[in-house]
Amino acid sequence: MTRTAAGAKGASSLGLVRPFVRQYSPRLVGGLAALLAVDLLQLGIPRFVKKAVDLLRGGTASQIALAQIALAIFLLALGIAGCRFVWRYLILGFSRLVERDLRDDFFRHLLILDRPFFQKKPVGAIMALATNDLAAVQLAGGMGLVACADAAIMGIAALACMAYINPHLTLIAVIPMPLLALLTRVLSARLHRRFLKVQEQFSHLTEFARSTITGIRLLKAFPISGLVGNTSLLLAIFFGGRLVILGTITVGDFVAFISYLYMLTWPMMAVGWVVNLFQRGLTSLGRLDEVMQASPTLADPEQSVSFPVGPTEISLRNLHFQYEGQGQPALAEMSCVIRPGEIVGLVGRSGSGKSTLCHLLARQYPVEDGAIFLNGADINRLSLASVRERVAYVPQDVLLFSDTVAANIGFGNPAASQEQIVDAAKICRIHEEILGFSEGYQTRIGERGVKLSGGQRQRIALARAILLDRPLLIIDDSLSAVDLETEQEIISGLAIFLPGRTCLIVSHRITPLRNAARIMVLEEGRLVAQGNHAELLATSPFYRTMYHQQQMHREEEL
């Protein structure tokens, strides 16, 4: 990446936090003012120490004078402590507020991204962004900003005080500093490249490896700064000592000069740390910006039409769909009509396109114009919200929350009564099992339903979808962990519960679908046959073979 491109990317990344800096600018200005006060108060202590040393050296010191100097130093220390508390509260609080708001924006943006984005971005990478990268931004905006401002203020002020005592000696003491600036510039570029690699691999590497790499960089940065500081101290002692002997400066001046040089050592030491923090923060901001710049592949049409009222009819017209990066289409030349109120089964081998069709009907992927119609309206002319609020979709991998059974069933319909929740559970043949739990419907099921069996999780998720009371219900092989008899009972119960509603049921087992109004058979993304169970047994060799194989397997199990 060229420097121009890197600079443009950095400016774009900083745009993520610019609104928060403006929002919390009073807090930031107040914190920086308190930090300035701390540094200025610290500069006063060596002046009082110089005065005390000169009094003692000249033999004119008294207990009252020394007590006054001690009191002044104590008051300065007290002021330093108070101002230090203020800047910590304001500036570190500022960094936490920025982290909170940036995290909120990040998760808010994630919610609008659709399925194709999450196929490219693994969960581990998103978790790394939401934790490690945001922490790096917070550290740069907190302690990094403090160290940078403190080093700049203290460095300039210390140099000014040193020059006031003796400009010639100050010039000698700062001779090694250009070397530090050069080394810092080289280190900065290396830090950016190396930390970017660390962040990109964070979802795959162990925390131990990451910490080790980071530690190596810090170990290399601080000894260089320390060497420069000690070299400056050596020069100050050698040449400053000669000036004291010659009487050019007093012993008090020399002690104060060394004190200011020690104050200058911290800014020099802080250079490597500040560069490290800012590079980490900027790198992490860049990684976050990549996600924030991502846009969903699905978008509402500029002029959407109203969703036609009434029971939902689905019309597929030469539907073709291919996943990005895949050589073969997932669906090809699919045409059919699913009539309102019809319960349709969908069967076929793994990879035949069953789930893909469900994803497209639930508007999780974009399709070409004129391929899918709902009640006669092209799905691309309807707003995403108007389609999704009419679809209840139960995926293969169901998701439950660490809450009660009742809360999970009623998640999509918070206004549902306990009676409605129980009715939905009864349709899904899970009611009796729930009553057997320790606290019935108020039993907490743990993270992702860890306390439940696979079949129980699936049936609770199905009950949640039923309670939504949507015109179109899609069950995407989400009863695979339920035994054959129970699945058949559930599908029979749905026929009674869903009058006037359209239902599409994907199942890898044919027997539970025998009573469906129609069964669609998919093979390699194509609709190869459709009809009721008896018709398909008579006309479709593929369906007949599948059915007999499953029957033989069932008999072997029995």
Image (cartoon, rainbow, N blue to C red):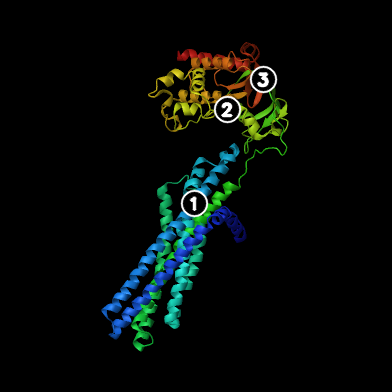
**Which is more foreground, mark 1 or mark 3?**
1
Q: Amino acid at mark 2?
A: Tyr
Quadrant of the rendered image containing residue 330? top right
- For disc 2, the marked residue is 393
Mark 3 and mark 2 lie on one chain; the one further toward the N terminus is 3
Q: Which mark is residue 289?
A: none
User: Is 163 on the left or on the right of 117, as rendered?
Assistant: left
CB atoms at circles 1 and 3 under 8 Å apart?
Answer: no
Which secondary structure lies at badge 1? helix
- For disc 1, the marked residue is 97
Establish if 239 lies above or below 382.
below
Quadrant of the rendered image containing residue 163? bottom left
Residue located at (72% from left, 28% from top): 377
Q: Amino acid at mark 1?
A: Leu
One can see residue 146 in this view: yes
**Which is more foreground, mark 1 or mark 2?**
1
Mark 1 and mark 2 lie on one chain; the one further toward the N terminus is 1
Q: In the image, residue 311 lies at what x, y percent?
A: 66, 21
CA distance for labels 1 and 2? 37 Å
Quarter of the N terminus within the rendering: bottom right
Q: In the image, residue 394 lies at what x, y percent?
A: 55, 27
Badge 2: residue crowd in 10 Å (few <14, some 14–19, many ≥20): many
Mark 1 and mark 3 lie on one chain; the one further toward the N terminus is 1
CA distance for labels 1 and 3? 51 Å
Q: In the image, residue 469 lies at what x, y percent?
A: 58, 24
User: Is 257 on the left or on the right of 373, as rendered?
Assistant: left
User: Is 314 on the left or on the right of 108, as rendered?
Assistant: right
- For disc 3, the marked residue is 340
Quarter of the C terminus within the rendering: top left
